[in-house]
Image (tube, rainbow, N blue to C red):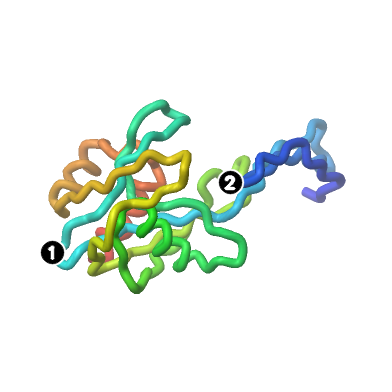
Amino acid sequence: MRELRRVEVFDAGFFRVERVSLEDRGSPVTLLRMPDWVMAVAVDAEGRFVLVRQHRFGIAAETVEPAGGLVDTDEAPAAAALRELREETGYAGTVAEPLGFTHPNPVLQDNHCHFFLVRGVVRIGAPHADAEEVVAPVVMGREEVEAALAEGRFAHALAELALRRALAQL
């Protein structure tokens, strides 16, 4: 469909809402324009997964998931994954191995979520999350992660996909 007109209707800083009029479509579509995201599946030298427990406002509950967040302007996704891992868990690694990407919600959004595996992570200090985040590292063995996946205990769909891709590489 050919785009006829695009109007920004709201700017929230880290995302914008646009209304787009398309040829042969009666009403405009609404798009959320946002930066790419990353998720870093971290594994220590003993094969334990370093995840993060955090409050998710959208569901008013805590989730356990790989560290992740927004890719900053002019930041490479791999660098963002390593940064988010340090900030949210206090663990660090040196190489972020790409596990591909997905479109989180292609109906409404234009961004990607990039997945990475970070092996051999070590604890370097306390988490230093953003002001609006309440986070705590969670360390789980592979069997525990596999059981949680099988039982549907990971509430975040992108977290589940990231963990499944990482397990396939390990």
Q: Nearer the viewer, mark 2 or mark 1?
A: 1
The residue shown at (37%, 69%) is 96
**How far across and how far down the image is residue 33, in percent?**
66, 47
Is the residue 43 above or below the residue 62 in the image? below
Residue 125 versus residue 148: which sits nearer the camera?
125
Q: How many marks?
A: 2
Q: Earlier in the sequence, mark 2 or mark 1?
A: 1
Q: Which mark is residue 46?
A: 1
What amino acid is at disc 1? Answer: Glu
Q: Which mark is residue 137?
A: none
**How far across and how far down the image is residue 22, in percent?**
81, 42
**Quarter of the rendering containing residue 99:** bottom left
**Quarter of the rendering containing residue 10:** top right
Q: Secondary structure at mark 2?
A: loop
**Quarter of the rendering containing residue 91:** bottom left
Residue 62 versus residue 164: which sits nearer the camera?
62
The residue shown at (32%, 46%) is 65
Q: Which mark is residue 106?
A: 2
Give the side of residue 112 with respect to residue 120, left or right: right
Task: Name the residue furthest top.
Answer: 60
